[in-house]
Image (spheres, grey):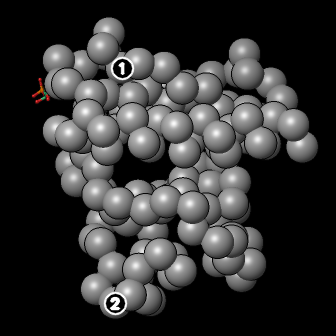
Amino acid sequence: PLPQVLDDPHEVEKSGLLNMTKIAQGGRKLRKNWGPSWVVLAGNSLVFYREPPTTAPSTVWGPAGSRPESSVDLRGAALAHGRHLSSRRNVLHAFCPLAPQIRTIPGHEFLLQSDHETELRSWHRALRAVIERLDRE
Ligand code: I3S
């Protein structure tokens, strides 16, 4: 699914450095593996890069020429506070179903975390706005 977004880049709505761990993939629970990630919100997607861009950010998809580590489709996604899933502070839990309209099918789940509460709140708002927009489409 990723080449499509690279061929047709959407405007970046938000990007920044967060701590991230996947916790489930295709409904299968994964062992946590927290690490820093350069996160880019654009179009229907949330894209994860290992490194922040070295050149002018915001209009490009992460570092020029670098491949994303992974990405998720936000259609049908749901957000929740991650307090039940982590001892860390300011944790956001995101669930992305494999089929956008079928939220009962297990999908991908990950946690986003920042030491700065305002930063995590602002990501929560931005993600919620995109998910709500996609819900109306
Ligand atoms: O949900 P858990 O199992 O308490 O998550 C912790 C573990 O993943 C731990 O690694 P080990 O697999 O070596 O136990 C990590 O170091 C912790 O960071 C995880 O918990 P937090 O509360 O940081 O999400």
Q: How many marks?
A: 2
Q: According to the image, label 1 marks what residue?
A: 82
The reply to whether dot 2 and dot 1 touch (C-beta < 8 Å) is no
Q: Say what secondary structure mark 1 lies in.
A: loop
In percent of the image, x 49 and y 26: which residue is there? 28
Q: Is residue 77 left or right of residue 112?
A: right
Marks 2 and 1, the one that precedes in the sequence: 2
Between 4 and 112, the one lying in front of the other is 112
| Circle 1 Cα neighbour tier, 10 Å, few/some/many (<14 / 14–19 / ≥20) | some
Q: Judge from the rendering whether residue 114 lies leftward or rightward of residue 111; answer left or right.
A: left
Query: In what quadrant does ligand 1 lie?
Result: top left
Residue 136 seen in render:
yes
Which residue, given by chain and number where applicable, does mark 2 sit on? 55
Q: Position of residue 120 (x, y in %)?
A: 34, 38
The answer to whether 43 is drawn above or below residue 59 in the figure is above
Query: Which residue is painted at 42% across and 42% down in the image?
Result: 122
Q: Where residue 2 sits in the image (x, y, percent)?
A: 64, 66
Under circle 2, the secondary element is loop
Circle 2 packing at 10 Å, graded few (<14), some (14-19), many (20+), is: few
Residue 43 vs residue 88: left or right?
right
Q: Amino acid at mark 2?
A: Thr
Which quarter of the picture shows residue 39? Answer: bottom left
Q: Is mark 1 within 8 Å of ligand 1?
A: no
Q: Nearer the viewer, residue 53 or 22?
A: 53
Q: Point out the residue furthest to the right here.
A: 137
Q: Is residue 69 above or below residue 56?
A: above
The C terminus is located in which quarter?
top right
The answer to which image quadrant residue 57 occupies is: bottom left
Residue 98 appears at what percent x and percent y?
69, 36
Which quadrant holds residue 24? top left
Residue 25 seen in the current view: no
